[in-house]
Amino acid sequence: MALPFARSLCLCRCGAKRLGVAAAEARRGVSFKLEEKTAHSSLALFKGDTGVKYGMVGLEPTTLILNVERFREWAVVLADTAVTSGRHYWEVTVKRSQQFRIGVADVDISRDSCIGVDDRSWVFTYAQRKWHTMLANEKAPIEGMGQPEKVGLLLEYEAQKLSLVDVSRIAVVHTLQTDFRGPVVPAFALWDGELLTHSGLEVPEGL
């Protein structure tokens, strides 16, 4: 049965719009919040659990609910959503922090460890006004990156890559070759200031 032209055109436009939305959703990366039950007692979450701030004293450990998920020795917090495939991009706003680490880690990383110390986490670390990659407690310097207010991370699971992105230029600054063997989660550590995460973003064109 033939449809009137106006109705056919409307259906085509609606279909194209739905396809466009579906394509955009397909390009959109992992959306996550920070998992309070993993946060070390020196860390406090804010802005709907998308930000984390460091406190010298922090929360009194005895007031926290005891669980095996919480980091016990280091100021680390993990995201609440694991990644097992695909390309994902998120950004981190840095506020008044001179020492922090950002990256990904195995979901079952030891809660007595710090990200970057073992071989089951892959991170970029900023300290003493310099950037480094960090894996299994081994550091390598990163050139051409100052202390921007916001940085990006690009995770390519099948390609086994994690990249640090300069958001001012939308350009990859450095790429870590990874060794993912299972689900990984965005991971954060800091020793001053605040970090605010922005997830559920599309991978920028050109990356």
Image: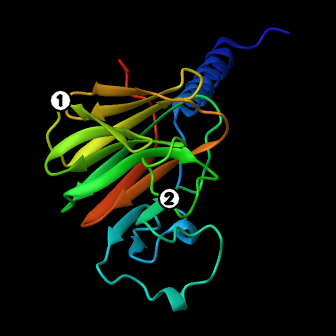
Q: Nearer the viewer, residue 138 or 27?
A: 138
Give how far across and how far down residue 4 sits, in percent. Answer: 71, 14
Compare marks 2 and 1 and give the one earlier in the sequence: 2
Give how far across and how far down residue 160 sits, in percent. Answer: 53, 25
Q: Is residue 176 above or below residue 76?
A: above
Question: In the image, 139: left or right of 187?
Answer: left
Q: Nearer the viewer, residue 111 or 95?
A: 111
Separation of marks 2 and 1 at Cα, in angstroms: 27 Å
Question: In the image, 85: left or right of 112?
Answer: right
Q: Which three-letter amino acid code belongs to the residue tagged 1?
A: Glu
Give how far across and how far down residue 173 sits, in percent. Answer: 26, 27
* The N terminus: image quadrant: top right
Q: Is residue 179 above or below residue 198?
A: above
Q: Is residue 93 above or below residue 204?
A: below
Q: Residues within 10 Å of mark 2 (few under 14, many from 20)?
A: some
* The C terminus: image quadrant: top left
The residue identified by callout 1 is 143
Scheme of colours in the image: rainbow
Question: In the image, 2: left or right of 187?
Answer: right
Element marked by disc 2 = loop
Q: Which three-letter amino acid code belongs to the residue tagged 2?
A: Ser
Which label number is shown at residue 113?
Answer: 2
